[in-house]
């Protein structure tokens, strides 16, 4: 088995550069802070970042790391509500616009 190599940051940063405001990054669950830097890149390039509410994440460290970054996460939602939020985003034309923090 290959060694553990966190790769969410690389994936999200690459998506941010290539697709900018069309990216929706969802930080679901995981250990460590992998994903927080990539989520920052997504937001800086105009994308949307959603994080699972830590209380509903299997492992809360990754979503907490993204949430702890200033003005990076557009929405913090319970795990069971993410699919509905994604459906609302994709059907409403919200993608590619900056959302007010709420």
Image: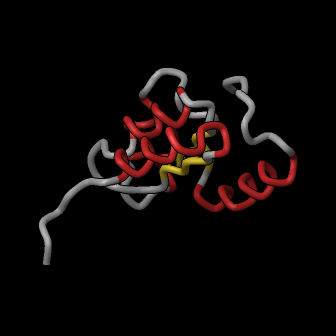
Question: Residue 61: image x %, image y %?
Answer: 34, 46
Residue at point 51% right, 55% down? 56
Whether residue 61 is visible, yes or no, is no
Count of marks placed on residues: 0
Q: Residue at x 72, y 28 (%)?
A: 99
91 sits left or right of 16 in the view = right
Q: Residue at x 37, y 51 (%)?
A: 8
Q: Position of residue 54 (x, y in %)?
A: 46, 47
Task: Write the residue at 50% across / 38% down.
Answer: 17
Way the structure is coloured: secondary structure
Give the farthest residue toward the right.
92
Q: Residue furthest front?
A: 18
Q: Position of residue 71 (x, y in %)?
A: 54, 23
Left/right placement of residue 72 relative to residue 84 reads left
Figure quadrant of the N terminus: bottom left
Residue 69 versus residue 19 in the image, above or below: above
Q: Is residue 97 visible?
A: yes
Q: Quadrant of the C terminus?
A: top right
Question: Is 53 left, or right, of 47 in this rendering?
Answer: left
Give the image location of residue 10, x and y in percent: 35, 47
């Amino acid at each position: 088995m290959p060694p553990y190599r966190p790769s969410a940051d690389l994936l999200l940063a690459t998506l941010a550069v290539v697709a900018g405001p069309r990216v929706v990054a969802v930080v679901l669950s995981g250990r460590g802070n992998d994903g927080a830097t990539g989520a920052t890149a997504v937001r800086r390039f105009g994308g949307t970042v959603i994080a699972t509410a830590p209380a509903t994440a299997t492992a809360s460290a990754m979503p907490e790391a993204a949430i702890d970054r200033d003005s990076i996460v557009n929405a913090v939602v319970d795990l069971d509500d993410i699919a509905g939020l994604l459906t609302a985003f994709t059907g409403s034309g919200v993608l590619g616009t900056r959302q007010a923090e709420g």
